[in-house]
Image (cartoon, grey):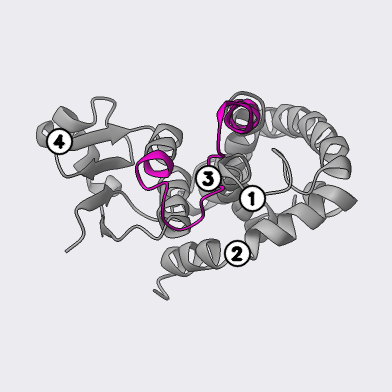
Amino acid sequence: MASVKIYGPPISTAVSRVLACLLEKEVQYKLINVNMAKGEHKKPDYLKLQPFGQVPLFQDEDITLFESRAICRYVSEKYSSQGNQSLWGKGPLERASIDQWLEAEGQSFNPPSAALVFQLAFAPRMRIKQDSVVIDKSLEKLIKVLDVYERRLEESRFLAGEDFTLADLSHLPNIQYLVKGTEKGAIFTSRQNVSRWWEEISGRDSWKKVVDLQSGKA
């Protein structure tokens, strides 16, 4: 029986990030859905464990964590001897390289891409009016980030070097929605190196399994 539990719907970008990490590390887990439409993430018992009332919530025996990137680092460290052993690098220099691109993802890539995911992919489903100003500004910011990525990926197979790491994995959820679920996918696929990188990282078995979970096939 798996001791690791992850709470939240797989369609959540943060939940899917952790799922991909668990699959890469070959960690058995139990996925427990949180019905956010019914406000289950705002109930007192849940807030005791996740004070911000968000997903994911992660439990490993008596350990409770939130924030998907921190969870991924924890999983990669605790289960370092199994699965993809390059996921968080070996030694301080490799980890520093991975961390700097994880920071770039969290601070530069995620804000505009997450805004676009919400505006272009989720707002129509939720019957919320799209904000064209937010869309335009987010596109402008994201294009500048992808220009940096294009140059980086011209000299490196993956963002942090020649191995697939958390730095790459962390980008998967937002790009998946934008490439597969909106009309803005060309900002990725029109860039030679970014497109090549996206095709490789999204083709990993771990991510394919996450996509199946999102679509209800798994």
Above-or-below relation of 116 to 176 = above
User: What quarter of the picture does the C terminus occupy?
Assistant: bottom left
Above-or-below relation of 145 to 217 = above
Mark 4–mark 3 CB contact (< 8 Å): no
Q: Which residue is mark 3?
A: 123
Q: Secondary structure at mark 2?
A: loop
Nearest the viewer among 188 and 165 is 165
Nearest the viewer among 87 and 113 is 87
Residue pictured at 44% horizontal, 63% vertical: 214
Is residue 87 covered in magenta? yes
Residue pictured at 64% horizontal, 37% vertical: 113
Q: Which residue is mark 2?
A: 204
The region drawn magenta spans: 75-103
Count of marks overlaid on the render: 4
**Please, what is the three-letter code of the amino acid marked with disc 3?**
Ala
Nearest the viewer among 26 and 89 is 89
Q: Secondary structure at mark 1?
A: loop
Q: Which residue is mark 4?
A: 43
Identify the mark nearer the N-term, 2 or 1.
Answer: 1
The CA distance from mark 4 to mark 2 is 36 Å
Q: Residues within 10 Å of mark 3 (few under 14, many from 20)?
A: some
Q: Which residue is mark 1?
A: 164
The CA distance from mark 3 to mark 1 is 32 Å
The CA distance from mark 4 to mark 1 is 38 Å
Q: Is residue 145 left or right of residue 118?
A: right
* Residue sticking out furthest to the left: 45
Q: Secondary structure at mark 4?
A: loop
The CA distance from mark 2 to mark 3 is 29 Å
Mark 4–mark 2 CB contact (< 8 Å): no
